[in-house]
Image: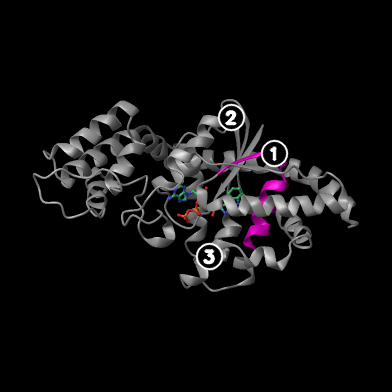
């Protein structure tokens, strides 16, 4: 199967990104044909800072590699290096009813948060559809928040196919129900735009501990049993624990022997260990930027080849010479 996903370079990667999308990709690359890209055109719609965007773009590519994306198995590239996507975006726009875009939750959420309601932000799902359909991707590992965008992609593809024949494959979202939405330190969905993230990479364990200490918990006094249900620290601990450990944790919560601080410390420790290899790999790639650029060039070349073939078919179907 062909699997594809993209991540916007709109800030530092957090554990929601990891458990929502990257971890699945790393697992899938063993058996499937994988495509992963850094969605830098998408980041423009959210108001990316032009001074920071180039570095953020490279950083996300490095993070992908550090977290286990293997360039020998996965095609990794920067979205803007394969321009065909913009042509397809325009062509697909013709098959996108305005009403469909008006129903997008993410658009409404973003303007509610004060992001300028530009046409780019509004038509973002069409660009995302182009990202996917251009590569005939079948499976798209994403967090729950992206399901609607996948439905829109299918709607657009269906409309196009109805008019022009079976040209696009209808993709499926792949959402891991266990980690569908990773909560942030305030209990809301962890998101770069909510300022509530725990990043994957901190310089020191102390910095990570400081962040984990900010996770909001109830005010049960020390010595009393704690509720694990609905507890943000527990929800995050689960991500780094085996089933057995989770059962133990539940008992520890109920025992009344431990306060929230204990669990925050445990979370820090587990997380720090979990990403140790990734930190080392990241340091390596930061020292070997030429290697990263080479990987991205190779990836773009491969992606471009597929994109160019697909666009020939698409152009012919819609009568563009
Ligand atoms: P953010 O909301 O932080 O800007 P993105 O929109 O760039 O994150 O998301 C990149 C990928 O990570 C998407 O597949 C998205 O569904 C996933 N993701 C982001 N936040 C979470 C979360 N809190 N829980 C699960 N998956 C998430
Ligand atoms: N819209 C996705 C997000 O904000 C990022 C993205 C862009 C994407 N294009 C994609 C994800 C194609 C999967 C497939 O998280």
Q: Which picture quadrant has residue 66?
A: top left
Asked if the stretch drawn in magenta spans residue 168, the answer is no
Mark 2 or mark 1: whose residue is earlier in sequence: 2
Q: For the residue labelled by badge 2, is the local secondary structure a helix, a strand or a loop?
A: loop
The residue tagged 1 is 302
According to the picture, the residue beneath numbered tag 2 turns out to be 72
Q: Residue, x 79% and y 44% (percent of image)?
A: 310
Distance from disc 2 to disc 3, alpha carbons, whole Å, reads 32 Å
Q: What percent of the width, then of the height, locates residue 90?
A: 75, 61
Say if disc 3 is inside 8 Å of ligand 1: yes
Within 10 Å of disc 1 (Cα), the crowding (few <14, some 14-19, many 20+) is: some
Task: Place residue 263 in its image quadrant.
Answer: top left
Q: Earlier in the sequence, mark 1 or mark 3?
A: 3
Percent coordinates x, y for residue 104 in the rendering? 60, 62
Name the side, left or right, on which 176 lies relative to 182.
right
User: Does any atom of ligand 2 lie closer than 8 Å to the CB of label 2?
Assistant: no
Res. 46 mark: 3
Q: Say which of 122 and 248 sits in front.
A: 248
Q: What is the spatial separation of the Cα atoms under label 1 and label 3, in whole angstroms?
A: 28 Å
Asked whether residue 315 is in view, the answer is: no
Q: Which residues are magenta?
A: 123-141
Relative to 245, residue 218 above or below: below
């Amino acid at each position: 199967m062909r699997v594809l996903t993209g991540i916007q370079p709109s800030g530092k990667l957090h554990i929601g990104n990891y458990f929502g999308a990257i971890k699945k990709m790393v697992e899938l690359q063993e058996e499937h044909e994988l495509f992963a890209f850094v969605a830098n055109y998408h980041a423009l719609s959210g108001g990316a800072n032009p001074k920071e965007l180039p570095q953020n773009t490279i950083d996300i590519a490095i993070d992908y590699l550090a977290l286990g994306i293997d360039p020998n198995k996965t095609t990794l590239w920067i979205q803007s290096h394969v321009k065909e996507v913009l042509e397809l975006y325009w062509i697909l726009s013709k098959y996108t009813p305005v009403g469909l875009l008006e129903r997008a939750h993410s658009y409404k959420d973003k303007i509610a948060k004060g992001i300028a309601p530009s046409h780019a932000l509004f038509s973002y799902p069409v660009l995302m559809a182009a990202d996917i359909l251009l590569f005939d991707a079948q499976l798209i590992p994403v967090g729950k928040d992206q399901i609607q965008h996948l439905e829109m992609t299918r709607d657009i593809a269906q409309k196009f196919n109805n008019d022009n024949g079976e040209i696009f494959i209808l993709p499926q979202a792949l959402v891991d129900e266990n980690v569908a939405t990773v909560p942030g330190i305030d209990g809301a969905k962890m998101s770069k735009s909510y300022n509530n993230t725990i990043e994957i990479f901190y310089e020191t364990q102390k910095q990570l501990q400081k962040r984990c200490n900010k996770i909001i918990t109830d005010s049960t006094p020390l010595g009393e049993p704690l509720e694990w249900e609905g507890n943000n620290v527990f929800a995050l601990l689960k991500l780094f624990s085996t089933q057995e450990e989770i059962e133990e944790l539940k008992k520890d919560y109920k025992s009344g022997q431990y306060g929230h601080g204990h669990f925050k410390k445990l979370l820090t420790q587990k997380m720090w260990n979990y990403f140790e290899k990734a930190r080392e790999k990241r340091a390596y790639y930061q020292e070997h930027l030429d290697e990263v650029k080479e990987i991205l060039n190779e990836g773009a070349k491969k992606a471009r080849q597929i994109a160019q073939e697909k666009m020939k078919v698409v152009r012919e179907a819609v009568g563009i010479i």
